[in-house]
Protein backbone atom coordinates (compact mmCIF):
# COMPACT_ATOMS: atom_id res chain seq x y z
CA UNK A 1 0.00 0.00 0.00
CA UNK A 2 2.82 2.35 0.93
CA UNK A 3 4.60 1.63 -2.36
CA UNK A 4 1.48 2.46 -4.39
CA UNK A 5 1.00 5.69 -2.46
CA UNK A 6 4.58 6.77 -3.18
CA UNK A 7 4.20 5.84 -6.84
CA UNK A 8 0.98 7.83 -7.07
CA UNK A 9 2.61 10.85 -5.45
CA UNK A 10 5.55 10.65 -7.84
CA UNK A 11 3.22 10.38 -10.80
CA UNK A 12 1.20 13.35 -9.58
CA UNK A 13 4.40 15.37 -9.11
CA UNK A 14 5.55 14.54 -12.64
CA UNK A 15 2.19 15.56 -14.11
CA UNK A 16 2.18 18.78 -12.09
CA UNK A 17 5.70 19.63 -13.24
CA UNK A 18 4.72 18.97 -16.85
CA UNK A 19 1.67 21.18 -16.51
CA UNK A 20 3.79 24.00 -15.04
CA UNK A 21 6.51 23.90 -17.65
CA UNK A 22 6.55 27.13 -19.60
CA UNK A 23 5.87 27.67 -23.23
CA UNK A 24 9.11 28.77 -24.88
CA UNK A 25 9.12 31.51 -27.52
CA UNK A 26 12.59 31.85 -29.00
CA UNK A 27 12.87 34.93 -31.22
CA UNK A 28 15.86 35.42 -33.50
CA UNK A 29 16.26 38.42 -35.77
CA UNK A 30 18.53 38.62 -38.78
CA UNK A 31 21.50 41.04 -38.97
CA UNK A 32 20.28 43.22 -36.09
CA UNK A 33 23.43 44.85 -34.79
CA UNK A 34 24.21 45.75 -31.20
CA UNK A 35 23.08 49.36 -31.74
CA UNK A 36 20.04 48.56 -33.93
CA UNK A 37 17.82 48.21 -30.88
CA UNK A 38 16.42 50.89 -28.61
CA UNK A 39 17.74 49.76 -25.25
CA UNK A 40 21.32 49.99 -26.55
CA UNK A 41 20.69 53.14 -28.60
CA UNK A 42 17.66 54.97 -27.20
CA UNK A 43 18.26 58.30 -28.95
CA UNK A 44 18.00 56.85 -32.43
CA UNK A 45 16.14 53.50 -32.48
CA UNK A 46 12.42 53.04 -31.77
CA UNK A 47 11.76 49.54 -30.38
CA UNK A 48 9.43 49.98 -27.40
CA UNK A 49 8.30 46.34 -27.27
CA UNK A 50 11.79 44.89 -27.27
CA UNK A 51 12.91 47.54 -24.79
CA UNK A 52 10.12 46.63 -22.35
CA UNK A 53 10.91 42.93 -22.58
CA UNK A 54 14.60 43.58 -21.97
CA UNK A 55 13.95 45.97 -19.07
CA UNK A 56 11.62 43.51 -17.31
CA UNK A 57 13.85 40.48 -17.87
CA UNK A 58 17.49 39.46 -17.86
CA UNK A 59 19.37 41.57 -20.37
CA UNK A 60 22.59 39.95 -21.58
CA UNK A 61 25.36 42.54 -21.69
CA UNK A 62 27.97 40.16 -23.11
CA UNK A 63 25.92 37.97 -25.42
CA UNK A 64 27.85 36.13 -28.13
CA UNK A 65 26.85 34.40 -31.36
CA UNK A 66 28.74 33.25 -34.44
CA UNK A 67 29.79 35.68 -37.21
CA UNK A 68 27.03 34.83 -39.70
CA UNK A 69 23.50 33.48 -39.91
CA UNK A 70 23.85 29.75 -40.65
CA UNK A 71 26.73 29.25 -38.19
CA UNK A 72 24.75 30.97 -35.41
CA UNK A 73 21.63 28.94 -36.12
CA UNK A 74 23.60 25.69 -36.08
CA UNK A 75 25.20 26.71 -32.77
CA UNK A 76 21.78 27.54 -31.33
CA UNK A 77 20.11 24.38 -32.55
CA UNK A 78 22.79 21.90 -31.62
CA UNK A 79 24.46 23.55 -28.61
CA UNK A 80 27.74 22.94 -30.42
CA UNK A 81 30.15 25.08 -32.38
CA UNK A 82 29.43 24.67 -36.11
CA UNK A 83 32.95 23.46 -36.87
CA UNK A 84 32.08 20.25 -35.06
CA UNK A 85 30.07 19.31 -38.18
CA UNK A 86 32.71 20.09 -40.78
CA UNK A 87 33.17 22.95 -43.21
CA UNK A 88 29.66 23.51 -44.57
CA UNK A 89 28.04 25.24 -41.57
CA UNK A 90 30.93 27.71 -41.16
CA UNK A 91 29.28 30.06 -43.67
CA UNK A 92 25.79 30.96 -44.90
CA UNK A 93 24.64 27.99 -46.96
CA UNK A 94 21.63 26.03 -48.19
CA UNK A 95 23.60 22.80 -47.93
CA UNK A 96 23.04 20.14 -45.30
CA UNK A 97 24.62 21.35 -42.06
CA UNK A 98 24.45 18.37 -39.72
CA UNK A 99 23.31 14.72 -39.86
CA UNK A 100 19.61 13.93 -39.54
CA UNK A 101 20.12 12.09 -36.26
CA UNK A 102 21.80 15.07 -34.58
CA UNK A 103 19.99 16.10 -31.38
CA UNK A 104 18.50 19.56 -31.86
CA UNK A 105 16.57 22.03 -29.76
CA UNK A 106 13.40 20.90 -31.53
CA UNK A 107 13.96 17.17 -31.01
CA UNK A 108 14.86 17.81 -27.38
CA UNK A 109 11.74 19.91 -26.72
CA UNK A 110 9.61 17.36 -28.55
CA UNK A 111 11.01 14.56 -26.41
CA UNK A 112 10.01 16.58 -23.34
CA UNK A 113 6.39 16.64 -24.50
CA UNK A 114 6.33 19.99 -26.30
CA UNK A 115 4.55 20.92 -29.51
CA UNK A 116 7.23 22.37 -31.79
CA UNK A 117 6.80 25.16 -34.32
CA UNK A 118 9.11 26.98 -36.70
CA UNK A 119 7.87 30.27 -38.15
CA UNK A 120 10.23 32.12 -40.46
CA UNK A 121 13.74 31.39 -41.68
CA UNK A 122 15.38 27.95 -41.47
CA UNK A 123 18.66 28.19 -43.47
CA UNK A 124 20.28 25.01 -42.20
CA UNK A 125 19.73 22.75 -45.18
CA UNK A 126 17.20 22.89 -47.98
CA UNK A 127 17.90 19.70 -49.88
CA UNK A 128 15.52 16.75 -50.07
CA UNK A 129 15.55 14.74 -46.86
CA UNK A 130 16.51 17.75 -44.79
CA UNK A 131 14.68 20.77 -43.39
CA UNK A 132 12.95 21.74 -40.15
CA UNK A 133 10.33 18.99 -40.04
CA UNK A 134 13.08 16.40 -40.41
CA UNK A 135 14.87 17.90 -37.39
CA UNK A 136 12.08 17.88 -34.84
CA UNK A 137 9.45 20.46 -35.80
CA UNK A 138 5.80 19.43 -35.89
CA UNK A 139 5.06 22.47 -38.05
CA UNK A 140 7.11 24.85 -40.16
CA UNK A 141 6.21 27.84 -42.31
CA UNK A 142 8.63 30.26 -43.95
CA UNK A 143 11.76 30.00 -46.07
CA UNK A 144 14.02 27.00 -46.22
CA UNK A 145 16.86 29.13 -47.58
CA UNK A 146 18.07 32.47 -46.27
CA UNK A 147 16.91 35.99 -47.00
CA UNK A 148 13.94 36.56 -49.31
CA UNK A 149 12.21 39.34 -51.16
CA UNK A 150 10.01 40.96 -48.56
CA UNK A 151 6.88 40.89 -50.71
CA UNK A 152 7.37 37.96 -53.10
CA UNK A 153 9.34 35.67 -50.74
CA UNK A 154 11.82 34.45 -53.35
CA UNK A 155 15.44 33.66 -52.59
CA UNK A 156 18.38 34.47 -54.86
CA UNK A 157 17.84 33.36 -58.45
CA UNK A 158 19.07 29.84 -58.95
CA UNK A 159 18.54 26.46 -57.34
CA UNK A 160 16.61 27.65 -54.28
CA UNK A 161 14.72 30.59 -55.78
CA UNK A 162 11.43 28.95 -54.75
CA UNK A 163 11.92 28.54 -51.02
CA UNK A 164 8.68 29.63 -49.33
CA UNK A 165 7.12 26.55 -47.74
CA UNK A 166 4.74 25.07 -45.25
CA UNK A 167 5.73 21.71 -43.75
CA UNK A 168 8.36 21.23 -46.47
CA UNK A 169 5.84 21.77 -49.29
CA UNK A 170 6.75 24.73 -51.48
CA UNK A 171 3.94 27.28 -51.78
CA UNK A 172 5.19 29.73 -54.42
CA UNK A 173 3.04 32.80 -54.85
CA UNK A 174 0.58 31.84 -52.11
CA UNK A 175 1.25 34.88 -49.96
CA UNK A 176 2.71 37.38 -52.41
CA UNK A 177 2.04 41.04 -51.74
CA UNK A 178 2.29 40.79 -47.95
CA UNK A 179 5.43 41.77 -46.07
CA UNK A 180 7.27 38.77 -44.69
CA UNK A 181 7.42 40.34 -41.21
CA UNK A 182 3.62 40.55 -41.15
CA UNK A 183 3.22 36.98 -42.36
CA UNK A 184 5.50 35.69 -39.62
CA UNK A 185 3.75 37.68 -36.89
CA UNK A 186 0.29 36.61 -38.07
CA UNK A 187 1.25 32.94 -38.16
CA UNK A 188 2.80 33.13 -34.70
CA UNK A 189 -0.36 34.81 -33.35
CA UNK A 190 -2.53 32.16 -34.99
CA UNK A 191 -0.53 29.37 -33.35
CA UNK A 192 -0.66 31.05 -29.94
CA UNK A 193 -4.44 31.38 -30.19
CA UNK A 194 -4.95 27.71 -30.99
CA UNK A 195 -5.95 25.27 -28.26
CA UNK A 196 -2.86 23.52 -26.89
CA UNK A 197 -2.94 20.32 -24.88
CA UNK A 198 0.81 20.55 -24.33
CA UNK A 199 3.24 23.40 -23.77
CA UNK A 200 4.66 24.74 -27.03
CA UNK A 201 8.12 25.62 -28.25
CA UNK A 202 8.06 28.23 -31.01
CA UNK A 203 11.16 29.22 -32.92
CA UNK A 204 10.18 32.58 -34.43
CA UNK A 205 12.95 33.39 -36.90
CA UNK A 206 12.28 36.77 -38.46
CA UNK A 207 13.92 37.67 -41.77
CA UNK A 208 14.14 41.34 -40.78
CA UNK A 209 16.20 43.44 -40.69
CA UNK A 210 18.25 41.50 -43.26
CA UNK A 211 18.38 42.90 -46.79
CA UNK A 212 16.51 43.46 -48.99
CA UNK A 213 15.05 46.34 -46.97
CA UNK A 214 11.63 47.09 -48.44
CA UNK A 215 9.02 49.04 -46.47
CA UNK A 216 6.14 49.95 -48.79
CA UNK A 217 3.41 50.47 -46.23
CA UNK A 218 0.08 50.66 -48.04
CA UNK A 219 1.79 51.14 -51.41
CA UNK A 220 2.34 47.43 -51.94
CA UNK A 221 2.55 47.54 -55.73
CA UNK A 222 5.62 49.78 -55.75
CA UNK A 223 9.00 48.63 -54.45
CA UNK A 224 10.72 50.97 -52.03
CA UNK A 225 12.63 53.62 -53.95
CA UNK A 226 13.94 57.12 -53.52
CA UNK A 227 11.62 59.92 -54.57
CA UNK A 228 12.73 61.21 -58.01
CA UNK A 229 11.72 64.70 -56.95
CA UNK A 230 13.72 64.51 -53.68
CA UNK A 231 16.49 61.87 -53.59
CA UNK A 232 16.95 62.36 -49.84
CA UNK A 233 13.44 61.00 -49.21
CA UNK A 234 11.82 57.65 -49.94
CA UNK A 235 8.76 57.83 -52.13
CA UNK A 236 5.60 58.20 -50.00
CA UNK A 237 7.81 58.23 -46.88
CA UNK A 238 5.56 60.72 -45.10
CA UNK A 239 2.58 58.37 -45.55
CA UNK A 240 4.18 55.09 -44.52
CA UNK A 241 3.78 54.27 -40.83
CA UNK A 242 7.14 52.62 -40.36
CA UNK A 243 9.07 55.78 -41.23
CA UNK A 244 7.11 57.83 -38.70
CA UNK A 245 7.38 56.50 -35.16
CA UNK A 246 5.44 58.32 -32.43
CA UNK A 247 8.65 59.59 -30.83
CA UNK A 248 9.91 61.07 -34.11
CA UNK A 249 13.27 59.32 -33.86
CA UNK A 250 13.35 57.99 -37.41
CA UNK A 251 12.61 61.33 -39.01
CA UNK A 252 15.47 62.93 -37.06
CA UNK A 253 17.89 60.75 -39.02
CA UNK A 254 19.05 62.74 -42.07
CA UNK A 255 20.41 59.81 -44.13
CA UNK A 256 17.75 57.93 -46.11
CA UNK A 257 19.56 54.58 -45.98
CA UNK A 258 19.68 54.74 -42.20
CA UNK A 259 16.02 55.77 -42.04
CA UNK A 260 15.09 52.70 -44.06
CA UNK A 261 16.86 50.41 -41.60
CA UNK A 262 15.23 52.21 -38.66
CA UNK A 263 11.82 51.83 -40.31
CA UNK A 264 12.46 48.11 -40.82
CA UNK A 265 13.38 47.69 -37.15
CA UNK A 266 10.29 49.65 -36.02
CA UNK A 267 8.14 47.33 -38.18
CA UNK A 268 9.89 44.30 -36.68
CA UNK A 269 9.37 45.57 -33.14
CA UNK A 270 5.69 46.16 -33.80
CA UNK A 271 5.34 42.57 -35.07
CA UNK A 272 6.98 41.25 -31.89
CA UNK A 273 4.57 43.40 -29.89
CA UNK A 274 1.64 41.70 -31.64
CA UNK A 275 2.98 38.28 -30.68
CA UNK A 276 3.44 39.27 -27.03
CA UNK A 277 -0.03 40.81 -26.99
CA UNK A 278 -1.47 37.51 -28.24
CA UNK A 279 0.21 35.72 -25.35
CA UNK A 280 -1.29 38.23 -22.92
CA UNK A 281 -4.80 38.10 -24.34
CA UNK A 282 -4.81 34.30 -24.40
CA UNK A 283 -3.69 34.12 -20.77
CA UNK A 284 -0.36 32.48 -21.62
CA UNK A 285 2.07 35.31 -21.02
CA UNK A 286 2.80 34.45 -17.38
CA UNK A 287 3.76 30.94 -18.40
CA UNK A 288 5.88 31.78 -21.42
CA UNK A 289 9.64 32.18 -21.42
CA UNK A 290 10.76 34.56 -24.18
CA UNK A 291 14.34 34.36 -25.41
CA UNK A 292 15.63 36.97 -27.85
CA UNK A 293 18.80 37.23 -29.91
CA UNK A 294 20.14 38.48 -33.20
CA UNK A 295 22.14 36.04 -35.30
CA UNK A 296 25.21 38.19 -36.00
CA UNK A 297 26.49 41.74 -36.19
CA UNK A 298 25.39 44.40 -38.68
CA UNK A 299 26.42 44.29 -42.36
CA UNK A 300 26.88 48.10 -42.53
CA UNK A 301 26.98 48.20 -46.37
CA UNK A 302 25.09 46.20 -48.98
CA UNK A 303 25.80 45.96 -52.72
CA UNK A 304 22.18 45.13 -53.62
CA UNK A 305 20.77 43.17 -56.57
CA UNK A 306 21.07 39.77 -54.84
CA UNK A 307 17.37 39.33 -53.99
CA UNK A 308 14.12 40.61 -55.48
CA UNK A 309 13.77 44.41 -55.19
CA UNK A 310 17.16 44.58 -53.50
CA UNK A 311 18.53 48.08 -52.99
CA UNK A 312 22.17 49.09 -52.71
CA UNK A 313 22.62 50.67 -49.28
CA UNK A 314 25.60 52.44 -47.75
CA UNK A 315 26.45 52.76 -44.06
CA UNK A 316 22.85 51.97 -43.18
CA UNK A 317 23.21 50.37 -39.73
CA UNK A 318 23.62 52.34 -36.54
CA UNK A 319 27.28 52.82 -35.52
CA UNK A 320 28.50 50.34 -32.90
CA UNK A 321 31.15 50.92 -30.22
CA UNK A 322 33.12 47.88 -31.37
CA UNK A 323 35.44 46.85 -34.16
CA UNK A 324 34.11 44.85 -37.09
CA UNK A 325 30.74 43.81 -38.49
CA UNK A 326 28.91 40.78 -39.86
CA UNK A 327 31.27 37.86 -40.74
CA UNK A 328 33.99 39.31 -38.50
CA UNK A 329 35.32 37.59 -35.40
CA UNK A 330 36.00 41.03 -34.02
CA UNK A 331 33.45 41.98 -31.37
CA UNK A 332 31.25 43.83 -33.87
CA UNK A 333 30.48 40.61 -35.73
CA UNK A 334 29.72 38.36 -32.75
CA UNK A 335 28.51 40.58 -29.87
CA UNK A 336 24.78 41.26 -30.30
CA UNK A 337 21.60 42.09 -28.34
CA UNK A 338 20.02 39.33 -26.28
CA UNK A 339 17.72 38.82 -23.29
CA UNK A 340 15.44 36.38 -21.47
CA UNK A 341 12.02 37.32 -20.10
CA UNK A 342 9.64 35.26 -17.95
CA UNK A 343 7.33 37.23 -15.64
CA UNK A 344 7.49 36.17 -12.02
CA UNK A 345 10.45 33.86 -12.62
CA UNK A 346 13.26 36.01 -14.04
CA UNK A 347 13.85 39.22 -12.11
CA UNK A 348 14.73 42.39 -14.01
CA UNK A 349 18.52 42.60 -14.16
CA UNK A 350 21.55 42.99 -16.37
CA UNK A 351 23.66 39.87 -16.76
CA UNK A 352 27.29 40.91 -17.17
CA UNK A 353 28.71 37.39 -17.42
CA UNK A 354 29.77 36.26 -20.87
CA UNK A 355 27.36 33.76 -22.40
CA UNK A 356 26.83 32.34 -25.86
CA UNK A 357 23.99 31.15 -28.06
CA UNK A 358 25.36 27.60 -27.64
CA UNK A 359 24.23 27.83 -24.01
CA UNK A 360 20.53 27.98 -24.80
CA UNK A 361 20.23 24.27 -25.66
CA UNK A 362 21.49 22.93 -22.30
CA UNK A 363 19.68 25.70 -20.43
CA UNK A 364 16.33 24.80 -21.98
CA UNK A 365 17.00 21.10 -21.48
CA UNK A 366 17.47 21.76 -17.77
CA UNK A 367 14.37 23.94 -17.62
CA UNK A 368 12.04 21.37 -19.19
CA UNK A 369 13.59 18.34 -17.54
CA UNK A 370 15.04 16.80 -20.70
CA UNK A 371 18.32 14.99 -21.11
CA UNK A 372 20.99 16.97 -22.92
CA UNK A 373 23.71 15.27 -24.98
CA UNK A 374 27.05 14.98 -23.20
CA UNK A 375 29.05 16.47 -26.09
CA UNK A 376 27.53 19.96 -26.02
CA UNK A 377 29.83 22.96 -26.06
CA UNK A 378 27.25 25.14 -24.31
CA UNK A 379 26.60 25.30 -20.58
CA UNK A 380 23.42 25.53 -18.56
CA UNK A 381 23.10 29.21 -17.58
CA UNK A 382 19.98 28.78 -15.45
CA UNK A 383 21.84 30.19 -12.46
CA UNK A 384 22.33 33.46 -14.34
CA UNK A 385 18.63 33.66 -15.18
CA UNK A 386 16.95 32.51 -11.98
CA UNK A 387 19.60 33.53 -9.46
CA UNK A 388 22.69 35.70 -9.45
CA UNK A 389 25.31 32.99 -9.34
CA UNK A 390 28.53 33.23 -11.30
CA UNK A 391 29.57 30.64 -13.85
CA UNK A 392 32.92 28.93 -13.86
CA UNK A 393 35.41 30.69 -16.11
CA UNK A 394 35.53 29.24 -19.61
CA UNK A 395 36.64 30.01 -23.15
CA UNK A 396 34.62 30.92 -26.26
CA UNK A 397 35.74 29.94 -29.74
CA UNK A 398 35.08 31.27 -33.24
CA UNK A 399 36.09 30.31 -36.76
CA UNK A 400 34.52 31.45 -40.02
CA UNK A 401 34.50 30.36 -43.67
CA UNK A 402 34.98 26.81 -45.00
CA UNK A 403 38.52 27.80 -45.97
CA UNK A 404 38.95 29.23 -42.52
CA UNK A 405 40.45 32.71 -42.58
CA UNK A 406 39.13 34.17 -39.29
CA UNK A 407 39.98 32.72 -35.90
CA UNK A 408 39.34 33.93 -32.35
CA UNK A 409 39.11 32.74 -28.76
CA UNK A 410 38.12 34.61 -25.62
CA UNK A 411 38.96 33.57 -22.07
CA UNK A 412 38.00 35.94 -19.27
CA UNK A 413 39.06 39.47 -20.17
CA UNK A 414 41.45 38.32 -22.87
CA UNK A 415 40.83 37.59 -26.54
CA UNK A 416 43.14 36.34 -29.30
CA UNK A 417 42.35 37.06 -32.96
CA UNK A 418 43.97 35.99 -36.24
CA UNK A 419 42.98 36.73 -39.84
CA UNK A 420 44.63 34.44 -42.38
CA UNK A 421 44.13 31.02 -43.96
CA UNK A 422 46.92 29.41 -41.95
CA UNK A 423 45.97 27.81 -38.67
CA UNK A 424 47.53 30.27 -36.22
CA UNK A 425 50.66 29.61 -34.21
CA UNK A 426 51.39 31.56 -31.01
CA UNK A 427 53.34 34.10 -33.07
CA UNK A 428 50.30 34.81 -35.30
CA UNK A 429 47.84 35.87 -32.63
CA UNK A 430 46.84 39.40 -31.78
CA UNK A 431 45.84 39.86 -28.14
CA UNK A 432 43.28 42.27 -26.67
CA UNK A 433 41.92 42.99 -23.21
CA UNK A 434 38.24 43.44 -24.06
CA UNK A 435 37.02 45.35 -20.96
CA UNK A 436 39.88 47.83 -21.31
CA UNK A 437 39.89 47.89 -25.11
CA UNK A 438 36.39 47.05 -26.42
CA UNK A 439 37.26 48.37 -29.89
CA UNK A 440 40.22 45.97 -30.14
CA UNK A 441 42.62 48.74 -31.12
CA UNK A 442 45.67 47.92 -28.98
CA UNK A 443 47.35 44.60 -29.74
CA UNK A 444 49.32 43.69 -26.61
CA UNK A 445 50.50 40.23 -27.67
CA UNK A 446 54.20 41.13 -27.34
CA UNK A 447 53.71 42.41 -23.81
CA UNK A 448 51.83 39.28 -22.65
CA UNK A 449 53.39 36.26 -24.35
CA UNK A 450 52.39 34.02 -21.43
CA UNK A 451 48.70 34.90 -21.88
CA UNK A 452 48.93 34.27 -25.62
CA UNK A 453 50.46 30.87 -24.91
CA UNK A 454 47.69 30.03 -22.44
CA UNK A 455 44.91 31.02 -24.85
CA UNK A 456 46.64 29.25 -27.73
CA UNK A 457 46.56 26.06 -25.69
CA UNK A 458 42.82 26.49 -25.19
CA UNK A 459 42.43 27.14 -28.91
CA UNK A 460 44.21 23.89 -29.77
CA UNK A 461 41.84 22.00 -27.48
CA UNK A 462 38.83 23.53 -29.25
CA UNK A 463 40.26 23.01 -32.71
CA UNK A 464 40.90 19.34 -31.96
CA UNK A 465 37.14 18.86 -31.50
CA UNK A 466 36.28 20.17 -34.97
CA UNK A 467 35.59 17.91 -37.89
CA UNK A 468 38.54 18.93 -40.05
CA UNK A 469 38.39 16.10 -42.59
CA UNK A 470 35.35 15.84 -44.81
CA UNK A 471 32.01 17.46 -44.20
CA UNK A 472 29.46 18.63 -46.72
CA UNK A 473 30.99 20.23 -49.80
CA UNK A 474 30.97 23.97 -49.09
CA UNK A 475 31.25 24.98 -52.76
CA UNK A 476 27.48 25.48 -53.08
CA UNK A 477 27.38 28.65 -51.04
CA UNK A 478 24.16 30.54 -51.44
CA UNK A 479 24.42 33.86 -49.73
CA UNK A 480 22.69 34.71 -46.50
Image (tube, rainbow, N blue to C red):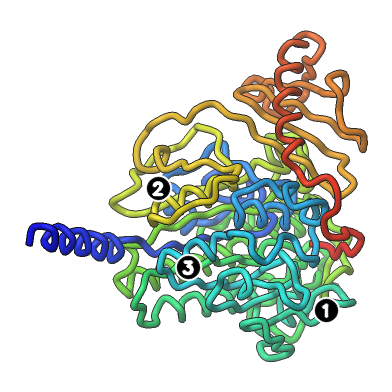
Marked residue nearer the N-terminal end (3 or 2):
2
| Label 3 close to label 2 by CB (< 8 Å) | no
Quadrant of image for the N terminus: bottom left
The residue pinned by badge 1 equals 161
| Label 3 close to label 1 by CB (< 8 Å) | no
- Label at residue 57: 2
Q: In which quarter of the image is residue 19?
A: bottom left
**Which of the two discs, 3 and 1, sits closer to the camera?**
3
Spatial CA span between label 3 and label 1: 31 Å
Residue 43 visible to an observer of this rendering: no
- Extreme residue in the left direction: 1
Q: Which residue is drawn at 74% across and 82% down?
A: 152
Quadrant of image for the C terminus: bottom right
Q: Which residue is drawn at 77% across and 65% down?
A: 96
Direction from residue 422 to residue 358 in the image, left or right: left
Direction from residue 476 to residue 106 in the image, left or right: left
Disc 2 crowd rating (10 Å Cα; few below 14, some 14-19, many 20+) is many
Q: Which residue is drawn at 58% across and 54% down?
A: 249
Front residue of this view, candidates 314 and 25: 25
What secondary structure is found at the residue carrying circle 2? loop
The residue pinned by badge 3 equals 110
Amino acid sequence: MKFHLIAALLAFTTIAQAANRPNVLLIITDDQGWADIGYNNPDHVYTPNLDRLAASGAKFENHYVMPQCTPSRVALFTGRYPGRFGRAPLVATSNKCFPVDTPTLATMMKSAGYETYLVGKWHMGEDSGDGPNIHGFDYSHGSLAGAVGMYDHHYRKGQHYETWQRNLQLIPGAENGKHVTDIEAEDAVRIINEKHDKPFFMYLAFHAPHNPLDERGQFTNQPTRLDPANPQRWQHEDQIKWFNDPAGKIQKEPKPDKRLLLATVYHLDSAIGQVVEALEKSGQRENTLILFTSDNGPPMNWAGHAYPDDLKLSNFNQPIPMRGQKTDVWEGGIHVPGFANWPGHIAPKTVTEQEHIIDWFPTLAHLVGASAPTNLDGRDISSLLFADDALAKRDFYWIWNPNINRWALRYGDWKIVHYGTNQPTPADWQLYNIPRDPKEENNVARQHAEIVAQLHGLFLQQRAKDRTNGGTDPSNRSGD
